[in-house]
Image: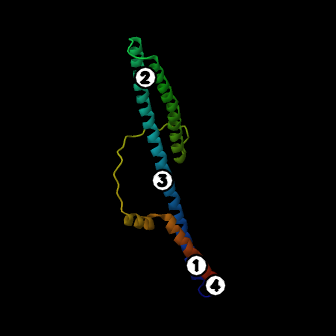
């Protein structure tokens, strides 16, 4: 029928656009997941180091409270309270250490590497101060989000297929 070939051509072109935008959307999703995993990796590493410093300071406080108790200036209750706090810190350190080991495993999995592959310590980076206006975000979403473009392309594909069906 007249117009069928042109409608099929347009439908195929829109289908190719849809696939291209869908692929781009998946790539952007993967990049976002890698960024989140890296941020978790950095957070877990920093938290672990801070926890170690905190535990070291708590150990020094425990030694000081023991020395004060032996000198007769402190109570046994002060020593016991400090020991309990140090135990709590060590329990928290075990949780943070678990995060410190799971974060690189997730990052490696997202990068299609062996889960146990060594990453090394995360690089120290300053967080940039980013300010975006609502209008800028709305414009960027409409132009840079391939999922939105893929949905629009999918709509156009269905319209072309409808044209093909009507002309047949």
- The Cα atoms of the two marked residues, 3 and 1, are separated by 33 Å
Q: Residues within 10 Å of mark 1 (few under 14, many from 20)?
A: many
Q: Confirm or deny contact between disc 1 and disc 4 (CB under 8 A).
A: no
Is 33 drawn above or below residue 124 in the view shown? Answer: below
Q: Residues within 10 Å of mark 4 (few under 14, many from 20)?
A: few
Label 4 residue SS: helix
* Residue hosting label 3: 32
Task: Decide if residue 136 is on the left or right side of residue 81.
Answer: left
| Inter-mark Cα distance, 2 to 3 | 40 Å
Mark 2 highlights which residue? 59
The quadrant holding residue 12 is bottom right
Position of residue 135 measured from the top left corner of the image (x, y, whole percent): 38, 67
| 3D distance between C-alphas at marks 2 and 1 | 73 Å
Q: Nearer the viewer, mark 3 or mark 4?
A: 3
Cα gap from disc 3 to disc 4, whole angstroms: 42 Å
Q: Are marks 2 and 4 in contact (CB under 8 Å)?
A: no
Q: Residue at x 39, y 40 (%)?
A: 123
Query: Which residue is under mark 4?
Result: 166
In-image side of 146 versus 160 (left or right): left
Query: What is the secondary structure assignment of the residue under circle 1?
Result: helix
């Amino acid at each position: 029928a007249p117009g069928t070939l042109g409608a099929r051509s347009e439908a195929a072109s829109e289908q190719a656009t849809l696939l291209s935008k869908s692929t781009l959307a998946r790539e952007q999703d993967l990049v976002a997941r890698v960024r989140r995993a890296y941020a978790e990796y950095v957070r877990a590493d920093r938290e672990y180091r801070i926890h170690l410093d905190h535990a070291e300071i708590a150990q020094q406080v425990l030694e000081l409270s023991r020395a004060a108790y032996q000198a007769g200036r402190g109570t046994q209750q002060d020593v016991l309270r400090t020991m309990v706090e140090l135990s709590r810190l060590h329990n928290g350190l075990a949780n943070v250490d678990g995060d410190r080991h799971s974060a690189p495993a997730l990052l490696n999995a997202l990068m299609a590497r062996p889960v146990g592959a060594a990453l090394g310590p995360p690089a120290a980076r300053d967080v940039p101060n980013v300010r975006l206006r609502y209008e800028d975000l709305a414009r960027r979403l409409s132009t840079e989000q391939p999922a939105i473009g893929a949905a629009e392309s999918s709509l156009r594909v269905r319209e072309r297929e409808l044209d093909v069906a009507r002309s047949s």
